[in-house]
Amino acid sequence: MRLAWPSEAPSAGSVLLRPWRASDAHLVAEFAADSYIPTIGSVPERVDDDGAAAWISRQLARAEQGTGYSFAVADKQTDRAVGHAGLSLRSDSGRAVGGYAISPQCRGRGYAKDALIALTGFGWSIQALHRIELYIEPWNVASLRTAERAGYLREGVLRSHQEIDGVRRDMTLYAALRPG
Ligand SMILES: CC(C)(COP(=O)(O)OP(=O)(O)OC[C@H]1O[C@@H](n2cnc3c(N)ncnc32)[C@H](O)[C@@H]1OP(=O)(O)O)[C@@H](O)C(=O)NCCC(=O)NCCS
């Protein structure tokens, strides 16, 4: 079932979450050049103009197909895309899994923290949602810190939880619950 898009762009601090545009292709290339992002998501290691356009189309299709939301994280001042934030919805479970990435060129400026706060606030506008989970590798201090700064609590380490880049990995589970 098609998911409704928010009438107002979710925002926090210096970012807003908006639909992807063809002009965001630069960000797909920046993601592809990162050593980690292609191993954890759907961005290929090598991407040309057609590949970037196809990736953007797939992001737009997620809400259409009812599997979740994929937002471009845009700087509020410039509207330039600096990252990605998404929610994967588990049908009828009341749970979603959050994900985020910031362009290597734009890190360390609070964009991920703001994006996760905006994404989480948006999540609570979905009435059926009660819990948002984050799965983070224990070495990924920047992401662990992002989760904590956005108010998520650490619930434990899931040993050998999933394969990334051909290796079984432990994942630290963080979660936020619907307020009050
Ligand atoms: C994780 C990631 C999204 C963080 O993005 P960012 O915009 O640089 O993060 P922010 O600037 O919002 O920083 C959030 C917190 O993490 C801290 N942090 C950021 N980079 C850090 C680093 N390399 N080492 C330690 N702490 C770091 C910041 O200091 C901040 O904490 P503070 O407010 O207490 O100072 C980014 O590094 C990234 O895209 N990594 C690759 C993809 C990825 O790992 N995604 C998450 C998968 S679970």
Image (spheres, rainbow, N blue to C red):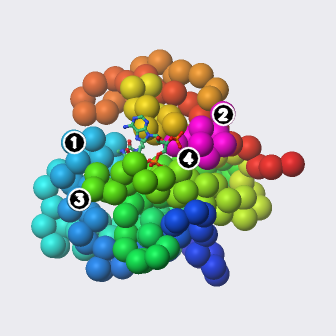
At a point 51% along the width and 37% down the height, the residue shown is 145
In the rendered structure, find residue 35 and report the number of the disc placed on it: 1
**Which residue is found at the position 53% from the left and 51% from the top?**
113
Q: Nearer the viewer, mark 4 or mark 2?
A: 2
**Which residue carries the number 3 mark?**
30
Q: Position of residue 35 (x, y in %)?
A: 21, 42
Give, as a three-letter code, the residue at label 3: Glu
Q: Quadrant of residue 46?
A: bottom left
Q: Is residue 53 above or below residue 83?
A: below
Q: Which is more N-terminal, label 2 or label 1?
A: 1
Mark 3: secondary structure: helix
For label 4, the residue is 97
In this image, 176 relative to 14: left or right? right
Categorize mark 3 by other alpha carbons within 10 Å: few (<14), some (14-19), many (20+): some
Between 51 and 99, the one lying in front of the other is: 99
Give the SS element for disc 1.
loop
Disc number lying in front (3 or 4):
3
Q: Tags 1 and 2 in contact by the CB under 8 Å rule?
A: no
Above or below for 23 versus 178: below
Q: Which residues are magenta?
A: 146-153
* Image vertical order of residue 173 relative to residue 128, above or below: above
Q: Which of disc 1 and disc 3 is earlier in sequence? A: 3
Marked residue nearer the N-terminal end (3 or 4): 3
